[in-house]
Image (tube, rainbow, N blue to C red):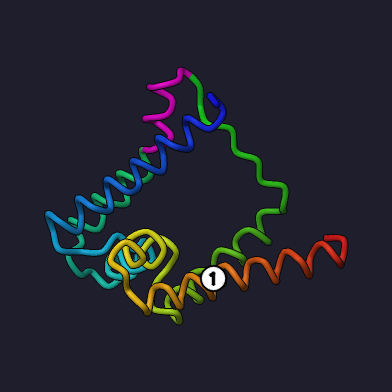
Amino acid sequence: MSEYLLSLVGGALIGLSSAMLLLLNGRIAGISGIVGRLAQGVNWQSNAAFLVGLALGPVAYLTATGKWPEIFIREPLPVVIVAGLLVGFGTRMGSGCTSGHGVVGLARLSPRSLAAVVCFVTAGMLAITILRRLGV
């Protein structure tokens, strides 16, 4: 069970921070929207503070456990960069990301978020199936 404890705590912290942002600021914790607004200079102090808080997550982990979180990236950096840009493009095209739709939208019982999450999950399952069949 201890192997799942950090994931449980992390998920609870994501939910808590999303709920606090919604209740205290009236804003949805969609990371793609926050990054987009920051790039546009809209409410930059609040958006920058939220992203700095995300970036400090590994430091909090280090403080709590005494070690850095293990991260394994098996793909070359150019592939990771292209994948990140494609995800960013898709989230802007889909008017939100998994954090906005999946965490906050589903909790608000948003039909639009339910449709988006079904599309995210279906596309992910399809991509993994195709890549595994290709041996990638």
Q: Position of residue 110 (x, y in %)?
A: 32, 74
Q: Is residue 126 above or below residue 65?
A: below
Determine whether, in the image, residue 17 is placed left or right of residue 97. left
Residue at 39% across / 22% down in the picture? 64
Residue placed farthest to the top in the image?
Answer: 66
Q: Amino acid at mark 1?
A: Phe
- The residue positioned farthest toward the bottom in the image shown: 93
What residue appears at the point 70 percent right and 69 percent down from the top-left corner?
127
Closer to the camera in the image, 3 or 46: 3
Examine the structure image and report whether residue 70 is included in the region drawn in magenta. Answer: no
Q: Is residue 115 above or below residue 133?
A: below
Q: What span is in magenta?
A: 57-66
**Image quadrant assignment for residue 39:** bottom left
Height in image: 91 above or below 57?
Answer: below
x and y percentages locating residue 18 in the rendered image = 28, 53
The residue at which mark 1 appears reads as 120
